[in-house]
Amino acid sequence: MEIDPLPNGSGSNAATSPETAATTTAITVASNTAPSSKLSHLTESLKLEHQFLRVPFEHFKKTIRTNHRTVEKEVSAVISSVTDVADSDEISKDDAILSLTSLVSRLQGIKRKLEEGSHAENLQAHRCRARLDHLDSADAENLSEWNNVRLKRILVDYMSRMSYYDSAMKLAESSNIQELVDIDVFQEAKKVIDGLRNQEVGPALAWCADNKSRLKKSKSKFEFQLRLQEFIELVRAENYMRAISYARRYLSPWGATHLKELQRVMATLAVRSHTECAKYQVLFEPKQWDFLVDQFKQEFCRLYGMTLEPLLNIYLQAGLSALKTPYCYEDDCTKEDPLSQDSFRKLAMPLPYSKQHHSKLVCYITKELMDTENPPQVLPNGYVYSTKALKEMAEKNNGKITCPRTGLVCSYSDLVKAYIS
């Protein structure tokens, strides 16, 4: 799965987020005993653990919100039922007993949901605590072992994003790092992704409903895109009356903010799915479902504070950026160079070269390279030529130099040597 890095505000009086505070605490604890060189390496390592703490924290908050909404809805229904019974003047004894029995059953259901919700919250809180303890355990003495655990966490993250859930689970269990990885979070995403790949928007719409407030806060268009696709499928099936009813119910509320996109999709009622007009034909292509999958991955990762790219790719690219040179893409590149392999070359393609080569300075007169053996000389008018060319000109003209571009005449002693840094 791919994802967007989230911007973080800064300020002297700004509130510190829990994950940032935890990372800072871990750095402080480690600094009391670590040697300076290893401490520096450890400090830099802990700066990369934003996602490690952010994901369980966001999951914890989501669990609390879900439980709160559920209980609030159930309690409101119970209060409404009690009010109705209390306001009823003519209620028989049997009806009253029946109503009370129903209320008792409902209250027992609420109690069960509260217990289940409390259990889920405790599990999430325990996971957050386990990760804080893991960061606290990092010090210079066990850095090698700690980095080994990190490598396994990165591999589990990659497997989970690539949908290798069984392999990810086996690695997590064999390494005893179940509380340090987020396989269950990715499994939640898998249900939606599988639905979209089967051209079903139901699971995705249910996910949008569960996260409606947060998606609205981030001004997400994902639900709108799902509704558009469902409308297109109705048009494809030539169920036009149902498509119109669907648009009135689900698409019209988006008209104020997405009018142009809405107008374009509504035009498909006239041009139909067999149109040859490229503007509308693209709406009926299967790749629209792939677009929805990619958009969901971005929204999902943004909600949980994950990176768009797998962590393994990010760490590999960090290393490849230090190794990438133009020579790596030559045919005679040594096989010891990781970038001699096509897979690494593809991963390093968007990265800059590690070495920035100097521009070549070529003399305007001789067309030869200007370097330490043939240094550049600056005329009073600011133009630069090679020492070799200017010496030959001075010897032919009794020590006089004539600028070939401006006609300025000066003495050879007026020249200033330029240095290339």
Image (spheres, grey):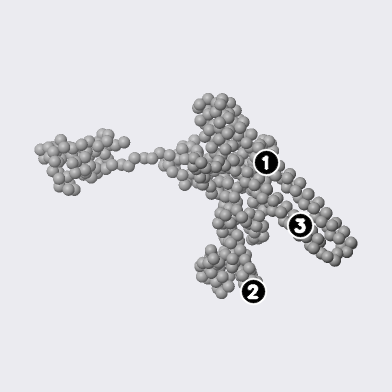
- Specify whether residue 71 is in view: yes
The residue nearer to you, when weighing 31 against 383, is 31
* Mark 1: few/some/many CA within 10 Å (<14, 14-19, 20+): some
Q: CA distance from mark 3 to mark 2?
A: 41 Å
- Label pair 1/3, CB-CB below 8 angstroms: no
**Dot 1 amino acid type:** Ala
Give the label on residue 293, or none: none
- Label pair 3/2, CB-CB below 8 angstroms: no
Give the label on residue 125, or none: 1
Residue 330 vs residue 55: left or right?
A: left
- Indicate the secondary structure of the residue bearing disc 3: helix
- Indicate the secondary structure of the residue bearing disc 2: helix
- Specify whether residue 396 is in view: no
Seen at 58% across and 26% down, the residue is 141
| Vertical comparison of 203 with 49: above or below | below
The residue nearer to you, when weighing 25 against 364, is 25
Q: Earlier in the sequence, mark 1 or mark 3?
A: 3
| Vertical comparison of 74 with 377: above or below | below
Where is residue 33, by image quadrant?
top right
User: Looking at the image, is mark 1 or mark 3 nearer the viewer?
Assistant: 3
Expressed as whole percent of the image width and height from the top left, the position of residue 80 reads 76, 60
Q: Which residue is mark 2?
A: 241
Where is residue 22, by image quadrant?
top right
Expressed as whole percent of the image width and height from the top left, the position of residue 207 reads 65, 55
**Dot 2 amino acid type:** Met
Give the label on residue 79, or none: 3
Q: Earlier in the sequence, mark 3 or mark 2?
A: 3
Residue 22 vs residue 345: left or right?
A: right
